[in-house]
Amino acid sequence: MQALYAQLLVGLINGSFYALLSLGLAVIFGMLNIINFAHGALYMMGAFCAYFLLNLAGIGYWPALIIAPIVVGIFGMILERTMLQWLSGLDHLYGLLLTFGIALIVQGVFQNYFGSSGLPYAIPDELKGGMNLGFMFLPIYRGWVVVFSLIVCLATWYLIEKTRLGANLRAATENPTLVRAFGINVPRMITLTYGLGVGLAALAGVLSAPINQVRPLMGADLIIVVFAVVVIGGMGSIMGSIITGFSLGVIEGLTKYFYPEASNTVVFVLMVLVLLVKPTGLTGRAA
Amino acid sequence: MAEVKMAEAPTKTTGTPVLSVQNLEAWYGESHILHGINFNVNAGEVVTLLGRNGAGKTTTLKSVMGIIGKRTGSIRFNDQDITRAASDKIARMGVAFCPEERGIFASLDVRENLLLPPIVRPGGLSLDQIFELFPNLKERLNSQGTKLSGGEQQMLAIARILRTGARFLMLDEPTEGLAPVIIQQIGHTIARLKSEGFTILLVEQNFRFAATVADRYYIVEHGKVIDGFANSELQANMDKLHTYLGV
C-alpha cells in the first residue's frame, strides 16, 4: 500500500504541473487563438530564473516564486508584442509553428550554455523534511507543491469566471471586435493575458526546480504530455483544464502502480480514445 | 477646408453636426462596399438610414465605429477626425454601438453583459433607470446572456450602452425579428432617449417603425447615399421611397 500512496503523490505532483501548464495554454488559446508550443520552454525559463536568482543574486526560493513569473511573463509579453500579435486572424498552424520555433531557439540557447544535465536547486529550509501521516511518509515540499498549485489554479479560475476583469476577458474571447468597440483596449488585454499564461508556466517551473532539477529540456519533455492533457480536457474550459490536469496526473500515478509498463503511454491512449469519441475534449465547447 | 463635397442636403438641418460623414468609402477585404457616403447627424436628432439588404447601411455604422478594416474619406465626430481611429478610442469619445446581431455574450450572465461596456463619461443611466426602462432585465440578471428571448436580448443590447454615458448611439436594426409589442417598447425607448437629448443614428428595414421615431432619413443604395428628406416631407416622398425600397 505504501507504494500505491507514493505513486498517488507523484501523480498529484505531476498533475499540479499539468494543471498549471494546461490552464495557461487554455487561457492563451482562448484569447489569442494560438497553440502556445513555447509553453514548455517558458516553464523551463521559470526554473532557470529561480536558479539565476539564487546563484547570481542570492535571492532565494520565496522571492523567486514571485519574481520569476513576472520576469518570464514580461519576456512573454515582449514575444507577443513583437511576433505573435502579427499572426492574429491567421490559421492556428502559423502560431503553432512560430511558438515551436521560439521553443527550439530558447531551448537551444540554454543547452548551449548549460548542457543537458540537471542543475541542482535546493528545497527551501522551511519545507525540508517530511511527516509521517500514518499510512505514508509525506515529504513536505511535495505536499506544498500540490496544495499551492491547487490554490493558484482556483485563484485563476476565480479571476476569470467571477470578476469584472474576467468578464472582459471572457467577452473578448467570444467577440474581440465588439468588446473593443465598447472602449476596452483589447490588444493590451491580449498582451496581458499572454503574460498571465506565461507567468503560470514560469511559476510551475519554479515549483518544479527543487523536485526535478533545472534542465534546458525539462519543458520539452513535459509539454508533449501537457498537450495531450489539453486535448483530453478540451480547450474551452478553465475548470476543465484544472480537473483534467490533476486527474490525469493521478491516473498516470495509478498506472505506475498497477501496470508500470503503460505509465508513459496511458495519457496518450486516453487522448486517442477521447479524440475518437468527443473530438472537442471532455469539457471543451465546439470551436 | 476648401471644396468639401457635402451631401446634396435636401433638407435644411438645424443644430451642429455631431457626426459628419463625407465621401466615405469602405472595403471588406477585397470587396468595395461603400462608394462615397455623405450624411450628417445633428445634436439631438434621430436619423435613419434606409435601404435594401446589402446596400451598405450596416457597413456605414461599422465604419463610423472603426471596425471595418479599410476606410477612406472623412468621418468627423464632434469636430474631431475619427476616420482612422481605433474603435476603442472612438467608443471612449462617446460613440456607442448596438450591433444587428445584438452581440450578447454567451459566457457572461445578464449582469456581466450589462456591466461590460466601460463608463466613458459621466451622465450615463444608472442601473435603476435602466431597470425602469426595461423591467424584464432586472428579473433575469443571473441568467446566461443568450438564454434571454430575442426581445430581451435586444433590450439588454440597448441597455448596456446607455450606462456608458455615450450620448451618440448607433442602433443597427433594433426591431429585426421581434414581436410587435416589443417593437413598440423599443420605439418608446428611442422616443424617451431622444427627449433626454441623445443623438441616435438608426439603421432600419422596418420603415413603418422608423417613421414613428425618425427626424430625418437618408436612402442608401449600392454603397452611396442617393437621397434624403425630413420626416415632415415623408408623405410627399412616399412614391419615391417605395421605388427605393422595393416595397
Image (cartoon, coloured by chain):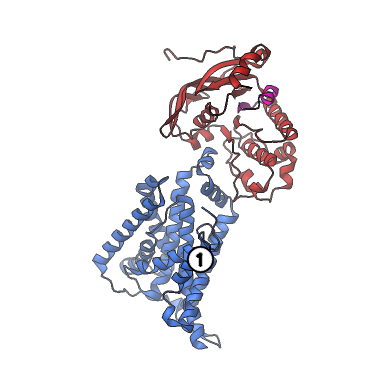
Viewer-side residue, A31 vs B218? B218
Dividing the image into 4 quarters, which one contains the C terminus of chain B? top right
Residue shown at the point (44%, 66%) measured from the top left: A228
Residue shown at the point (68%, 22%) measured from the top left: B211
Residue A183 is situated, as x and y percent measured from the top left of the image, at: 53, 39
Residue A253 is situated, as x and y percent measured from the top left of the image, at: 48, 78
Let me know if residue B174 is in the magenta part: no
Q: Is residue B86 depicted above or below A27 in this figure?
A: above
Q: SS for tag 1?
A: helix
Residue A250 is situated, as x and y percent measured from the top left of the image, at: 51, 75
User: Chain drawn blue, letter?
Assistant: A
Let me know if residue B203 is in the magenta part: yes
Q: Amino acid at mark 1?
A: Val
Residue A112 left/right relative to A94: left
| Residues rendered magenta in the picture | B198-212
**Residue underneath mark 1:** A274
Residue shown at the point (37%, 59%) measured from the top left: A38
Q: Colour of chain B?
A: red
Residue B215 is situated, as x and y percent measured from the top left of the image, at: 65, 19
Viewer-side residue, A253 vs A285? A285
Residue A95 left/right relative to B188: left
